[in-house]
Structures are given as structure tokens and as C-alpha cells.
Image (cartoon, rainbow, N blue to C red):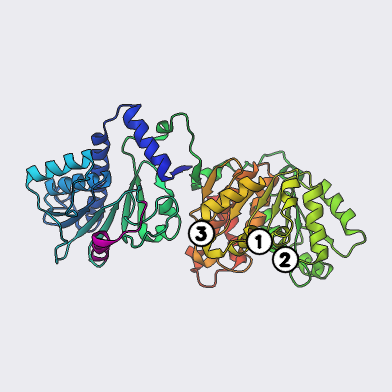
């Protein structure tokens, strides 16, 4: 599992490493510069080198532009350029005219460059460069870029050559990924210690290019009494899915009750139910409209079927709730009175975790007190439109505050919130959150969310803790989509294709 940080946490870790552990700031700066230099070298080695002697001189004669600011990010840049110069590169530094506010460490690095007599100018030269290094601003940027800084960014973006950002592209807000006026468009971002949130959240992710994390001597020890709260699952973490035992039976792997599908919406029930089975659930019971019975018996004969048309539907639902290990409710049920009664009954009487999606969320958006009153863990899985209805916010506002919106909702209503977007955020009531980076744009298709609901329910049925099941479910869902996209492309990728990817991903791990 990868640790992610916001700018406040990163600054505190940096401070703790220097002040508590006694690692000098300039040592960290040199290690950061060495890491960036090595990644730049690697880029050229893979295209130009055939032997060890060439590796040692891969940067010889390469034209390198390094644009530095006055903070410590600029100090990193001066050190990067100097190291490349010592490797034989032809380096030009650019710095804004007024350097009176330069940090102590950056001034030290600039003084070293001055003694080596490497050119430092105030205007970006009108020439081509093989490498353009952005070291203008780091994670501390708090205002939109204007004036000479904006001019620098525009000229750098218009250049050819490899574009490398030091820690984070200048102009990207470190916590939200927002573009602050203008931002550097990197091919490669070398970030230090931990990935910053703004490198994963959009639009920052589009500006960061390939993100490489390098160790510079700051690790989890530097959190000291505090604990990290932001994470990203890796494929290695999927091994934490409960193992299959030799002498267990179908009841040992949990019972999923899927409440889904009004008339002519059998697909929603099928996709959620089959996803639960494919993820490992032992038994799935589908409660759906009578009109869907024959279709589901053909599509998913393994499922136990019940219908809304049977007498005393609430009584039957209560009996099903007593049977279930987990409830997945909402896909395709509509928002009429019967559907409202079902959702209300589930949240009032369930004794097991509930996954609430789609129409279930639209119903709850008019009755948010049901979430507060529910006695069992609830996982909500809204897309942006559904989140807008739940929070009474515009979608554009939510996009700009994706992580914050999910966290606020999770805390306010004491639920696990899986806010679905190009970067799905899973937020827990205790403040922890996961950002999912698996998945692709082919998964923006009808039924994809129903599959995710079933995956999460399947993991819950096998005994996973709700927060872990939700975050891991998002990761598995994305990986299944990625596997199928690699096989067939993103055009025409359908929800059933994602289903096909689930057992393949689980098999590979």
C-alpha cells in the first residue's frame, strides 16, 4: 500500500526529518537532485546507450534548461542542473530578476553554481533544449501564477525536449490537483518520499506525466506521532482478499442479497449479482421485479430469485435480510414508492453491512436522516451526479473538491463513501481515504457501477472490513477493466467485459 500526502503532511515530515532526526536540509536537497538527475539519465540511456562507457556519458553535450524559483524547489533545481553539468551537459539556468526572497538553502545552491560559472539568466533563451527542468514552485504554491512566472510556464510548455517537473509541476495545487492559472506540462515528474495528492487527482494527473517516487531519506518514521491518512492500493494488496479454504462450503463465503432491477432493468441485477459471485461470494439471492425472473434464470442460474410482486414484500425483505451476510441495494430499482419502501426497510432493519448504489442513493438523497439512523455499516457508491443530489452541490464544484467532498460526506453521515470518477475516492468516517488509480476511460459505460457494487458486496461477504472492501473493490474493479482494455481496447468496452476481467485478475495474484 502506498502512502499519499497533502502538502501539510509533507511539510511536517520534511520538518521532522530535519529537526527531530537531525538530517540536514542540504543533504535532503542533494539526494532529491541526484534522484532527478538519475531519472533524466535513465530516459536517455534507454534510447542511446549500448555499453557501460556510453552510460557514463549519456548526458554529454545535451542542452538542458533549468528554470528555478526562490524556494527550496528552486534549490533542488540548481543542484539538478549542477549535477547534469558535471555529467557533461550544457546547462542554462533561468531565475526571475528579483532574488531577494531566496531561501537559505537555495541561495547556497545558487552560490555553488556561480562558483562553477554555469550561466544564470533572467530570460528563457530562444533555442531548443534536450531537457527542460521545472523547479519554479513546489508544493507550497497558494496563488495563481501571473506575470513573469506565467510567461516562463508558457514558454517552457511550448518547447520540445523532455520536460521534467521537480516534485510537482509548477502551477498544480498539491492537495486538489487544480491548475492555478497556468501549469507546467511535464512528461515526467520525479516526486520525493511520497506521492502528493495533486499528482493523482485531475486535472493535476494530466500535467504530471509519468510519476516516479524516489526515496531521499524521508519515510513513514517522519510522521512521528501522527499517522498517514491517505493511501493507494497496489496489486500486491489484493493478496489480502480472504483465501479459499479446502474444507469450507458455499455458506462459508458469505450470502449476498442483491435488491436490484425494476421492470425492464434486469441487467442491473444481473451485473451486481454476477460480480458478487465472481469476486468470491458463496451464495447470491436476487430480489427483483417479477418481469425479470425468466431473464435472470437464464443469465444467472446460480442465483436464488425472489420478486417484488410476492405478497407482503416488506415481510419477505425482512426475512431475506436475516438470511444475508451483506446487502447490495439500489441498481435499477427506480425511485417510486415501492422502491422507497425497500430502501427504508433495508436501512432500518438490516443487521449486516449495506452497499447502497444508484437509485438507492437517489432515494436517500431525499431522506438523509436514514443514513444517520442506520445501525450497521453503510457503503455509498455515488457517481458525480448522484453525489450532487446527496450534497446539493453542482457537479463542477464536486470535481474541484473530489477528495474533500467524499471525506466530508463520510464524516457527516458516518458512512464509507466511494465517490466514483476518473480517480475514485474511498473515504472512511475516521478520516482515512484511498485514491484509486486503476481503471480507464473505456469503463465509463452503462452498468460499470453495478459491477462495482457487486464486487464490494462480494468482498464484504467474505469477511472483509467495510472500508477495506470498498477501497479494494474499487481497485479490483479498475484492474479488471484495465485487463480487458489491454485485450480489446477501450472502445466498445462493456460492463460484461469488466465481469470477465475479475476472475483473471484474481487468478494472476
The earlier-in-sequence mark between 3 and 2 is: 2
How far apart marks 3 and 2 lie (CA) works out to 23 Å
Q: Secondary structure at mark 2?
A: loop
Q: Is residue 464 left or right of residue 144?
A: right
Magenta part mainly helix, strand or loop? Answer: helix
Q: Is residue 152 magenta?
A: yes
Residue at 54% across, 59% down: 398
CA separation in Å, label 1 and label 3: 15 Å
* First in residue order: circle 1 vs circle 3: 3
Q: Residues within 10 Å of mark 1 (few under 14, many from 20)?
A: many
The residue sitting at 43% across, 44% down in the picture is: 5
Judge left or right: residue 125 versus residue 477.
Answer: left
User: Residue 275 falls in which quadrant of the image?
Assistant: bottom right
Q: How many marks?
A: 3
Residue 282 on image: x %, y %: 73, 48
The image position of residue 35, as x and y in percent, is: 27, 44
Is residue 467 a member of the stretch shown in magenta? no
Circles 1, 3 touching at the beta carbon (< 8 Å): no
Which label is found at residue 332? 2
Local secondary structure at mark 3: loop
The earlier-in-sequence mark between 2 and 1 is: 2
Instruction: Inspect this view and state whether residue 304 appears.
Output: no
Please determine whether, in this image, residue 199 is positioned above or below residue 432: below
Mark sitting on residue 439: 3
Q: Which residue is mark 1?
A: 450
The residue range painted magenta reads: 142-157
Amino acid at each position: 500500500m502506498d502512502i499519499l500526502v497533502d502538502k501539510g503532511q509533507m511539510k511536517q515530515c520534511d520538518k521532522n526529518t530535519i529537526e527531530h532526526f537531525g538530517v540536514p536540509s542540504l543533504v535532503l536537497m542533494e539526494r532529491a537532485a541526484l534522484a532527478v538527475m538519475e531519472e533524466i539519465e535513465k530516459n536517455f540511456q534507454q534510447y542511446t546507450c549500448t555499453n557501460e562507457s556510453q552510460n557514463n556519458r549519456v548526458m554529454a553535450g545535451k542542452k538542458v534548461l533549468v528554470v528555478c524559483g526562490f524556494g527550496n524547489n528552486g534549490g533542488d533545481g540548481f543542484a539538478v542542473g549542477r549535477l547534469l553539468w558535471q555529467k557533461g551537459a550544457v546547462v542554462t539556468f533561468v531565475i526571475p530578476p528579483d532574488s531577494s526572497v531566496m531561501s537559505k538553502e537555495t541561495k547556497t545552491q545558487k552560490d555553488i553554481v556561480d562558483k562553477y560559472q554555469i550561466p544564470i539568466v533572467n530570460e528563457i533563451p530562444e533555442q531548443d533544449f534536450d531537457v527542460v527542468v521545472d523547479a519554479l514552485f513546489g508544493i507550497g504554491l497558494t496563488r495563481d501564477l501571473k506575470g513573469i512566472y506565467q510567461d516562463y510556464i508558457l514558454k517552457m510548455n511550448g518547447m520540445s525536449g523532455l520536460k521534467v517537473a521537480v516534485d510537482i509541476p509548477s502551477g498544480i495545487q498539491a492537495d486538489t490537483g487544480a491548475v492555478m492559472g497556468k501549469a507546467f506540462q511535464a512528461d515526467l515528474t520525479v516526486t520525493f518520499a511520497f506521492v502528493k495528492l495533486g499528482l493523482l487527482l485531475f486535472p493535476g494527473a494530466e500535467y504530471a506525466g509519468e510519476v516516479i517516487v524516489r526515496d531521499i531519506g524521508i519515510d513513514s518514521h517522519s510522521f512521528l506521532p501522527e499517522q498517514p491518512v491517505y493511501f493507494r492500493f497496489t496489486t500486491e494488496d489484493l493478496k489480502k482478499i480472504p483465501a479459499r479454504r479446502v474444507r469450507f462450503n458455499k455458506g462459508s463465503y458469505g450470502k449476498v442479497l442483491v435488491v436490484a432491477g425494476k421492470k425492464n432493468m434486469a441487467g442491473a441485477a444481473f451485473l451486481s449479482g454476477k460480480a458478487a459471485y465472481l469476486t468470491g461470494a458463496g451464495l447470491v439471492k436476487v430480489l427483483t421485479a417479477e418481469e425479470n425472473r425468466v431473464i435472470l434464470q437464464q443469465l444467472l442460474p446460480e442465483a436464488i430469485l425472489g420478486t417484488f410482486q410476492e405478497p407482503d414484500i416488506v415481510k419477505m425483505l425482512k426475512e431475506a435480510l436475516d438470511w444475508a451476510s451483506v446487502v447490495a441495494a439500489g441498481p435499477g430499482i427506480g425511485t417510486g414508492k415501492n422502491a422507497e419502501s425497500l430502501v427504508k426497510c433495508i436501512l432500518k432493519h438490516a443487521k449486516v453491512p449495506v452497499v447502497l448504489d444508484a437509485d438507492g442513493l437517489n432515494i436517500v438523497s431525499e431522506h438523509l436522516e436514514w443514513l444517520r439512523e442506520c445501525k450497521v455499516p453503510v457503503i455509498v457508491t455515488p457517481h458525480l451526479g448522484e453525489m450532487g443530489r446527496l450534497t446539493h452541490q453542482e457537479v463542477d464544484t464536486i470535481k474541484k473538491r473530489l477528495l474533500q467532498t467524499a471525506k466530508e460526506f463520510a464524516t457527516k453521515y458516518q458512512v464509507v463513501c466511494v465517490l466514483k470518477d476518473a480517480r475514485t475516492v474511498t473515504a472512511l468516517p475516521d478520516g482515512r481515504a484511498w485514491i484509486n488509480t486503476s481503471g480507464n476511460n473505456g469503463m465509463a459505460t452503462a452498468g460499470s457501477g453495478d459491477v462495482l457494487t457487486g464486487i464490494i458486496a462480494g468482498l464484504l461477504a467474505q469477511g472483509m472490513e467495510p472500508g477495506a472492501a470498498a477501497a479494494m473493490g474499487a481497485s479490483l474493479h479498475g484492474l479488471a477493466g484495465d485487463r480487458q482494455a489491454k485485450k480489446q481496447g477501450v472502445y466498445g468496452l462493456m460492463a460484461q467485459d469488466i465481469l470477465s476481467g475479475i476472475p483473471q485478475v484474481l487468478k494472476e495474484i
